[in-house]
Amino acid sequence: FVKTHDISELNQELIGKEVVLGGWIEDLRKLGKMSFITLRDVSGISQVIVKGELNDNLGEINRQSVVSIRGIVQETKARDFAFEVKADEIEVLGKAIHPLPIDPIGRLESNIDTRLNHRALDMRNQKTASIFKLRHHVLQSLRKTLADKKFIEITTPKIIGSASEGGADLFSLDYFGKTAYLAQSPQLYKEQMTIGLERVFEISNFYRAENSHTGRHLTEFTSIDIEAAFMDYEDVMNVLESLVVSVYKDISENCKTEQESIEHAIEIPSVPFERITYTQCVDELKKAGEKVEFGDDLLDSHLRIIGQNHPGFFFLTDWPMKLKPFYIREKDEDATLSRSFDLQYGFLELSSGGTRLHNPEMLKERLKEQGLDPNQFADHLKTFDWGMPPHSGWGMGLDRLMTTLIGIDNVREVVLYPRDPDRLSP
Ligand code: AMO
């Protein structure tokens, strides 16, 4: 069996010619001497007409079975199809049981847990398939834009010997008798790479042992990370802003079918994104009656208030140093403030980043201040004696970005097999 065409490739010039299609039976109606099959493949749907002896011998075929169909392309009177195929041969390549655990047509809606338990079958639901086609386009778009901006794609290790983001939230594993960890981010490696490659990016999965049960936390998530030599946090904020807008524009203009299928029209955000400082945020919260002081971390409830005041994308900048990881650099004019930012979409944090400390002595001091042992970071620190350029970067959750793009509020919808504290399989 050789599939000659995808269904979307059927065209006027093929009328009267023979094709071999491969796909799944979405519908099969027997009307006496004739049968009508609705056949779906990844590219679209077509009608197949079965007549004569072939129809007489057509036994029971359950819906959603996978078949190959050889036949002749012809014009159709049916409204829903551009062409139809008159079958000369039908071969069942793989049977589907009946009933199936979820309805892949989506007429009967299943809850997210049931769908995740049968995720492969869920992929035959056009809404779900469209989400993953969009995710594919987003990844392509991100890679292209970053490469155009002269960022080089790297892949850093996911099995590591010591924590990169400080001690919390680490998964550990036995590594031939030693303890190893799953990387929480590519932070240290991406910084190191700036000494030779200047601008790098990575799109990979990272791991956080966070016992969170929300629509935005996973234990395994996909991160888009950049790091750039000779850039300050303002510069990498601009990279982030233009990257987000270019992805929205690309997807909005080039993925019309998928947007129709998920019933969501992507709106291109306007620039520049608003920039508000942490200090302004605290003032706004105080005015709203919240008990919050400079230096407090912003709670989810705080971010919801701020998000209501500033809908859509905005940068939250200049966080207090004491809330930031050891690698973030302070502001020259006020050492209590950091050169850092989060990109928010309403209350949702999409990205965080900043200017890094690149002076090894200061970095060692900062590690000690935060209760970390510089000896544990020896491999990292030594690279700072080899001509470490000033550098900045950020990390953005791809799964969270996808939820804002397609207008939903659960990251599990945009991840093939999400991992969270309650879900380790399938
Ligand atoms: P941070 O810890 O803020 O920063 O992570 C960056 C972004 O990654 C996403 N993210 C998550 N998404 C889903 N589930 C999770 N459990 C999860 N944790 C994080 C968020 C977040 O904004 N090294 C720094 C980045 C940098 O400074 O370059 C870091 O990891 O969208």
Image (spheres, rainbow, N blue to C red):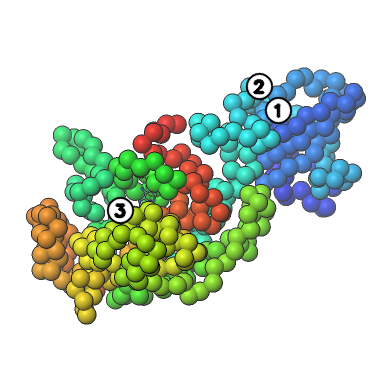
Q: Which mark sits nearer the N-terminus, 2 or 1?
A: 1
- Depth check, front residue: 374 or 52: 374
Q: Is residue 160 above or below residue 188?
A: above
- Depth check, front residue: 302 or 195: 302
CA distance for labels 3 and 2 = 44 Å
Q: Which mark sits nearer the N-terminus, 3 or 2?
A: 2
In the image, taking residue 253 as reference, residue 426 lies left or right, namely left
| Labels 3, 1: front one | 3
Q: Is residue 265 visible?
A: yes
- Depth check, front residue: 406 or 322: 322
Count of numbered badges drawn on the protein: 3
Asked which secondary structure carries label 3, the reply is loop
Question: Which kind of residue does numbered mark 1 sit on?
Answer: Arg
Write down the residue under mark 3.
185
Q: Position of residue 283 (x, y in %)?
A: 34, 69
Q: Quadrant of the N terminus?
A: top right
Label 1 neighbour load within 10 Å: few <14, some 14-19, many 20+: many
Q: Is mark 3 within 8 Å of ligand 1?
A: yes
- Cβ atoms under marks 2 and 1 closer than 8 Å: yes
Question: Which kind of residue does numbered mark 2 sit on?
Answer: His
Q: Looking at the rendered structure, which numbered label has been put on residue 98?
A: 2
- Cβ atoms under marks 3 and 2 closer than 8 Å: no
Q: Position of residue 77 (x, y in %)?
A: 89, 44
Ligand 1's quadrant is bottom left
Write down the residue under mark 1.
63
Q: Which mark sits nearer the N-terminus, 3 or 1?
A: 1
Question: Which kind of residue does numbered mark 3 sit on?
Answer: Ser
Q: In the image, what residue occupies the spot 80% across and 39% down?
A: 47
In the image, taking residue 216 as reference, residue 185 lies left or right, namely left
